Image (tube, rainbow, N blue to C red):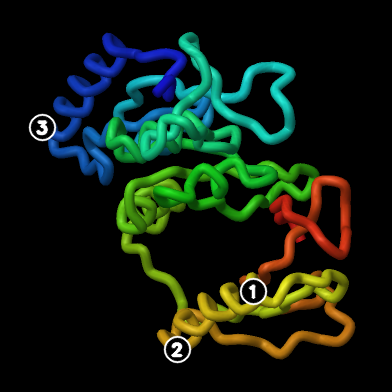
Amino acid sequence: MCAFVEVWREAALRRASEVDAQVGAGEALPLAGVPIAVKGRHGLRTAGPLVTAGCVAVGATSVPAPGTPWQTWGLGAHGRTVNPWRADRTPGGSSAGSAAAVAAGLVALATGSDGAGSVRIPAAWCVGLKTTNRDRASLTAPGILARSATDAAAWWRAVSGTPDGTASFPVTALWSPDLGFAAPDPEPVALARAVVAPLVDGGVARLARPRAPLRLEDSKARLLLTPTVWSSSGRSRRASVARTRP
């Protein structure tokens, strides 16, 4: 599948032995022994919280080669990264190798990063979570590829510092089908609105009334729910590229 560009066999075995020793000494590691993959050769730098939680990094996943066109795919030593569900397809997104490794069951979790869909696009056949980007100067935010929502939640508890997973519900959310400028097709609007309904009915989200005109910086909502996206070339009435910094 060309999901990995490097496999760290010896380092992984050493780390697994260290985790065994830590657990044997009574140390609480929430993700003890969980095998993970990291995005790219330098991905281990940002995987510190996962390693601290007990994860064992087994290798670096494929990312686009220099000069790859904007619609990206992973590239390993033996060629492009293959979608494990269909060998004639690629996973898409720059976190391609991470998604392929998770979807094929090679690892439980794999790190990613997302500025324009690089976690969410290849997560179409597994679970992807792009976290909130607190750096207003950058579009890229860290994320995770996981086999299930339960696994993604375990990752979040480990890296967020909230081991009990407590949260205050309902979360105040703002629904806007067009962000005040777009002309989205009715079908994606209806699909997105259908996803919002269970969140509201289940007490997870509470919809706030948007101001007119819509000003995101004035909103007290913690979530923005919309099928409309921000294109790679800026604001446009029709866009298919998910660049999601509001």
Q: Amino acid at mark 3?
A: Gly
Q: Amino acid at mark 2?
A: Asp
Task: State the residue position of label 1.
Answer: 187
Mark-to-mark CA distance, 2 and 3: 45 Å
Image position, residue 80 (x, y; %):
52, 21
Q: Are the residues at dot 1 and dot 2 in contact (C-beta closer than 8 Å)?
A: no
- Residue occupying the point 30% across, 39% down: 108
Task: State the residue position of label 3.
Answer: 24
Q: Amino acid at mark 1?
A: Glu
Image position, residue 105 (x, y; %):
28, 36
Q: Is residue 51 visible?
A: no
Quick one: quadrant of the C terminus?
bottom right
- Residue occupying the point 81% across, 76% down: 218
- Residue occupying the point 79% across, 57% down: 239
Mark-to-mark CA distance, 1 and 3: 55 Å
Q: Is residue 184 above or below residue 233?
A: below
Quadrant assignment, res 14:
top left
Q: Secondary structure at mark 2?
A: helix
Q: Is residue 229 left or right of residue 43?
A: right
Give the number of the mark in front: 1 or 2. 1
Q: Callout 1: 10 Å neighbours few (<14), some, many (20+)?
A: few
Residue furthest to the left: 24
- Name the mark on residue 201: 2
**In the image shown, does 237 or 95 lie closer to the viewer?**
237
**In the image shown, does 130 or 178 lie closer to the viewer?**
178
Q: Secondary structure at mark 1?
A: helix
N-term mark: 1 or 3: 3
